Image: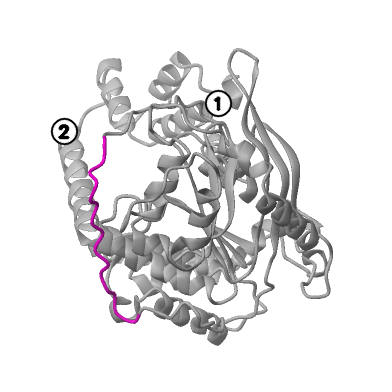
């Protein structure tokens, strides 16, 4: 193991470099190197440099492969909280936002993409507990998501909203999946699916030294295939900035943005990859009413370009809830309580629940999103009707299933993704290296505090150690050991 250790090669090279100099006699060098069982010979200095370089590239490659392919599933406890009683009069104020697009207007996309019908049939998901037992998180979910529509994925705490979206998006590498996920009439191919989808997480992680425009251009250059010209990429970037109402602040540094603006940047970074399906995990989390509305109107604009949008959301306001075209409502245990259109002022959903005997009526001016969660017993400690059974026995379920089976068949209206030649990786190694190097250099250039700190500290350390050991003789082993301390510093 001694000869395989990179530390031993680093020590050997440094020791030989130091004690092979003219400052030491041959006897001194030999005696001291022999005390550490280090063979003499300057060739070992270059061996050490070469082997360390080899180890660097080896471990960097292995680390990159591990980060790319290995995903760890964390077991999380589910906290069940009892909701406090709500007042009879809940007031929701709808605020305006500049340039809000009309819900009926369909905008053209800056780059061509293949619209995608996404269908799930009898989808179930199981995880293995530490005890070895299997726990079922999703139970027989059947639904379809069509291009140009924005569907909300809602439910009680622990109902499996994010789990369902992660299973569909292919982000669950552990557990056991049963059922079918179909795109444009074909079973989901993970290789193709990753090229036509984008996923916006809750966390907004960006380089704070880059501007909004640069962040989107960086994503477009790395995630769009080389078949698109630079002009086409910039057109998509500019259109995305307009859709998300970021054009006027495109030159602002990401580090100076508000939480809501960073959220829109996160969405924009994903949209410039030109996906046909967009997943969003609670994009309004941590935002106030106005900021959340601005973000969701931007998402609605993206859906109107013909993309399929699936979004988990928690307790939206009336104005935000009415932006959605459809709803997939999950009940605790991973059951479907409702799937279908919302309609104007959520009338279709309200009519469905009103048709079920024993369901409480919605109060005037009450938030339909809050009402439906209360109806299915989300966060309320009282016995409620099993609305998953009601849904399975309803005409709505039958019509939804027929529509899902219809969309799951190959159709002339939609292109099968298997017929398109998707690259495993959008762009080549040299382009990735160029873009990453350019971004890193720009980050250093715009971070003078860090650069000045390095420029100040390194010369300072050099002066301190240099003056400490200046003209130190090598007359004894004790003094020679002081040189070893300098090597480690």
Left/right placement of residue 73 relative to residue 260 reads: right
**Please, is residue 5 above or below residue 423 in the view?**
above
The residue at the point 34 percent across, 80 percent down is 247
Image quarter of residue 335? top right
Mark pair 2, 1: CA separation: 31 Å
**Cβ atoms under marks 2 and 1 closer than 8 Å:** no
Query: Mark 1 highlights which residue?
Result: 5
For this rendering, which residue is in front, 309 or 246? 309
Query: Mark 2 highlights which residue?
Result: 468
| Callout 1 secondary element | loop
Magenta span dominant secondary structure: loop
Q: Is residue 388 magenta?
A: no
Q: Tell me which segment is drawn in magenta.
A: 85-99
The residue at the point 54 percent across, 80 percent down is 233
Asked whether residue 385 is in view, the answer is: yes
Q: Residues within 10 Å of mark 1 (few under 14, many from 20)?
A: few
**Please, is residue 115 above or below residue 118 in the view?**
below
Q: How many marks?
A: 2
The residue at the point 41 percent across, 24 percent down is 29
| Callout 2 secondary element | helix
Left/right placement of residue 317 relative to residue 188 reads: left
Image quarter of residue 114? bottom right
**First in residue order: circle 2 vs circle 1:** 1
For this rendering, which residue is in front, 415 or 413? 413
């Amino acid at each position: 193991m001694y000869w395989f250790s990179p530390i031993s090669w680093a020590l050997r090279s440094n020791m030989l470099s130091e004690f092979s100099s003219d400052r030491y006699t041959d006897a001194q060098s030999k005696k001291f190197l022999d005390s550490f069982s280090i063979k003499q010979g300057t060739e070992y200095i270059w061996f050490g440099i070469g082997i360390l370089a080899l180890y660097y590239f080896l471990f960097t490659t292995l680390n990159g492969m591990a980060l790319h392919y290995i995903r760890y599933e964390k077991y999380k406890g589910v906290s069940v909280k009892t909701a406090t009683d709500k007042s009879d009069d809940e007031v929701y104020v709808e605020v305006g936002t500049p340039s809000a697009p009309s819900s009926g207007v369909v905008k053209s996309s800056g780059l061509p993409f293949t619209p995608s019908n996404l269908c799930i049939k009898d989808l179930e998901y199981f995880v293995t507990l530490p005890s070895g037992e299997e726990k079922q998180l999703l139970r027989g979910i059947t639904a379809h998501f069509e291009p140009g529509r924005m569907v909300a994925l809602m439910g009680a705490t622990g109902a499996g909203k994010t789990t369902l979206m992660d299973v569909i998006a292919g982000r669950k590498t552990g557990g056991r999946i049963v059922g079918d996920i179909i795109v444009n009439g074909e079973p989901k191919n993970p290789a193709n699916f990753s090229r036509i989808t984008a996923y916006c997480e809750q966390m907004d992680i960006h380089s704070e030294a880059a501007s909004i425009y640069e962040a989107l251009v960086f994503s477009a250059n790395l995630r769009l295939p080389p078949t698109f010209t630079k002009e086409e990429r910039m057109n998509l970037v500019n259109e995305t900035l307009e859709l998300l109402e970021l054009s006027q602040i495109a030159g602002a540094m990401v580090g100076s943005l508000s939480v809501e603006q960073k959220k829109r940047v996160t969405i924009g970074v994903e949209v410039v990859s030109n996906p046909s399906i967009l997943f969003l995990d609670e994009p309004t989390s941590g935002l106030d009413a106005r900021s959340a509305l601005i973000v969701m109107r931007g998402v609605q604009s993206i859906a109107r370009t013909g993309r399929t949008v699936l979004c988990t959301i928690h307790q939206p306001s009336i104005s935000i809830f009415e932006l959605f075209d459809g709803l997939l409502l999950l009940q605790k245990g991973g059951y479907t309580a409702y799937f279908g259109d919302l309609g104007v002022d959520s009338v279709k959903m309200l009519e469905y629940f009103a048709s079920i005997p024993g369901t409480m009526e919605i109060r005037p001016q009450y938030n339909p999103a809050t009402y439906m969660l209360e109806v299915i017993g989300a966060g309320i400690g009282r016995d409620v009707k099993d609305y998953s059974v009601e849904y399975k026995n309803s005409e709505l379920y039958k019509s939804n299933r027929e529509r899902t089976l219809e969309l799951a068949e190959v159709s002339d209206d939609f292109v099968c993704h298997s017929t398109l030649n998707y690259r495993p990786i959008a762009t080549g190694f040299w382009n990735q290296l160029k873009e990453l190097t350019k971004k890193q250099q720009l980050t250093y250039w715009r971070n003078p505090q860090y650069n000045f700190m390095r420029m100040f500290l390194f010369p300072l350390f050099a002066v301190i150690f240099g003056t400490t050991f200046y003209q130190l003789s090598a007359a004894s082993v004790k003094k020679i050991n002081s040189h070893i301390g300098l090597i480690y510093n």
